[in-house]
Amino acid sequence: MKILPGCIPCISKQIMKIARLVYDDINLQMNLMRFGVNFLGSIDWNKSALEIVSLLYKELHEKFGIYDPYKDIKVKSNETMLSLIDSLRGYLKRADDPLRVALKLSVAGNIIDYGTERTFDAIKTIERVLNTDFYIDDYEILREKLNRSKKILMIGDNAGEIVLDKILVELLRRMGLEVYYMVRAHPVINDATMEDAIQIGMDKLAKIVELDISGVGRGIRYTEIEDYMKSFDIILSKGQGNFELFSDLKNENIFFLLMVKCDVISYYINAPIGSSILMSIIRIKQD
């Protein structure tokens, strides 16, 4: 999914958030904002929003020394969700269908996102999502495919959210699946990186692989991802950013698990803001 007009104001607001996070001085904030706006005006827009933001973060690191402005927030998000993990596991123990509940928990965690303008309350969101159906629901297709699968790639999205992904990965392991979990090779907003995976213990459950979107020289390059995915029976892609990144691929084994958090995605998949989505890529009309 290439960038759309509605994505530009969102990216601009992200630049402003970064400026305020790293600088108290208004002149330094303005200087970074000027750089960010010029960057947006000069870059090729024939890319997804996540590609553009990833390239922006690489530039901010190289030119301003800004590497991971959300680091403290990410660590706190992970700690907060880890403090709840035992009670969250209890939802699965009480469930008639633990897999559906684990998927719902995972998508509820998708609200922990500082890349949108929506505010969130993780606990209230978890309770709401568990008590509502997926607005787009390809659960039966996924479940049937899981019964015939051996190897799954889960593509993570945000810190904090990764803790709820851990609960799903634990269940997938109990189902006999070999699980790979993909994180960003370079910090982008509050997206999960290798540090987050290690902090919450995901590395004890799954093979952690890094996705290099911006060309930092570590991990699986984005240009190679389609070939890399061919070795997996199922790819479970988390969040809006990954939807934007992978929705144009032709791999019919991809499933998207996300919460709709902006007008652009709402329009693109015809689902209301706030709705939970479990969608096979085969639903997307591909040229």
Image (cartoon, grey):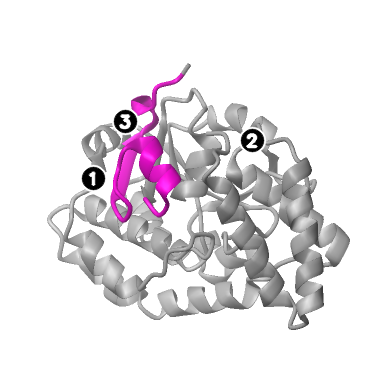
- Give the percent coordinates (x, y) of residue 119: 41, 69
| 250 or 267: nearer the viewer | 267
Task: Give the class, few, some or many, for how many residues have Cα within 10 Å of label 2's Cα (few <14, many ≥20).
Answer: some
Can you tell which of label 3 and label 2 is closer to the viewer? 2
Q: Which residue is mark 3?
A: 148
Q: Is residue 132 above or below residue 278?
A: below
Q: Can the viewer see residue 177 in this picture? A: no
Q: Is residue 241 above or below residue 94?
A: above
Disc sitting over residue 47 in the figure: 2
Mark closest to the chain's N terminus, 3 or 1: 1
Disc 2 secondary structure class: loop
Task: Give the class, few, some or many, for how many residues have Cα within 10 Å of label 1's Cα (few <14, many ≥20).
Answer: some
Can you tell which of label 3 and label 1 is closer to the viewer? 1
- The residue under the point 67% across, 36% down is 45
Mark closest to the chain's N terminus, 3 or 2: 2
Q: Which residue is mark 1?
A: 135
- Rendering quarter of residue 19: bottom right
Q: What's drawn in magenta, residue-wise?
A: 260-286
Q: Is residue 2 magenta?
A: no
Q: Are marks 3 and 1 in contact (CB under 8 Å)?
A: no
